[in-house]
Image (tube, rainbow, N blue to C red):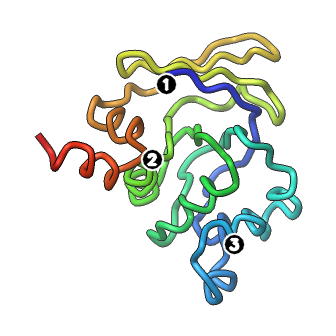
Amino acid sequence: MTIHGRARLLGDDINTDYIISSARKRATIDPHALSPYLLESIAPGFAASVRPGDLIVAGRNFGCGSAMEVAVTVIQAAGIRAVLARSFARSFFRNAINNGLLVMECDTSSLAEGDDLSVEMEGGHVLVRNTSRGGMISGADVPEIVQRLIEHGGLVPYLSARGGFE
């Protein structure tokens, strides 16, 4: 699997209420209706600048805060293909996998806003190539079951296709 995209740089401790504010979720949890408000409290205009295929590149503890599944689905609805971060909050990481959003742990410190990235995953091994400025980063290995869930688009499609876990 190879994904190409533009890096959209964020910092550490991006919590789920930054991803989509609680005030916005009072009216709806439809991710397509909420995607225009993605990260509005910390990066006004971010959602309007997202291009399909962009990649979020963040620091430590991405997705901390409450365990809101809608934080993941809003990222997907905005057209973002994957999130690369130094670390993830456990609940966000699990929600991402369950919804088919590719999340990869790697050292993102050398990546910059707008870098063109090629993320390659083969046999669970992850390589991130910076095709704008050169360089390569190894990511944490992705377990086989996580690869299968991502390939199917998440847990429910996986279970539907297979009739359950092996």
Callout 2: helix, strand or loop? loop
Name the kind of residue labelled 3 in the image. Answer: Ala
Q: Badge 3 is on which residue?
A: 33
Choose top left, top right, bottom left or bottom right for residue 13.
Answer: bottom right
Choose top left, top right, bottom left or bottom right for residue 46.
Answer: bottom right
3D distance between C-alphas at marks 2 and 1: 18 Å
**Residue at 59% of width from left, 42% of height from top?**
83
| Residues tagged 2 and 1 counted as in contact (Cβ below 8 A) | no
> Within 10 angstroms of label 2, few (less than 14), some, or many (20 or more) residues?
many
Question: Picture coordinates of residue 115 (x, y %)?
Answer: 80, 27
Question: Picture coordinates of residue 82 (x, y %)?
Answer: 58, 40
**Residue at 46% of width from left, 52% of height from top?**
96
Q: Earlier in the sequence, mark 1 or mark 3?
A: 3
Circle on res. 100: 2
Circle on res. 139: 1
| Residues tagged 1 and 3 counted as in contact (Cβ below 8 A) | no
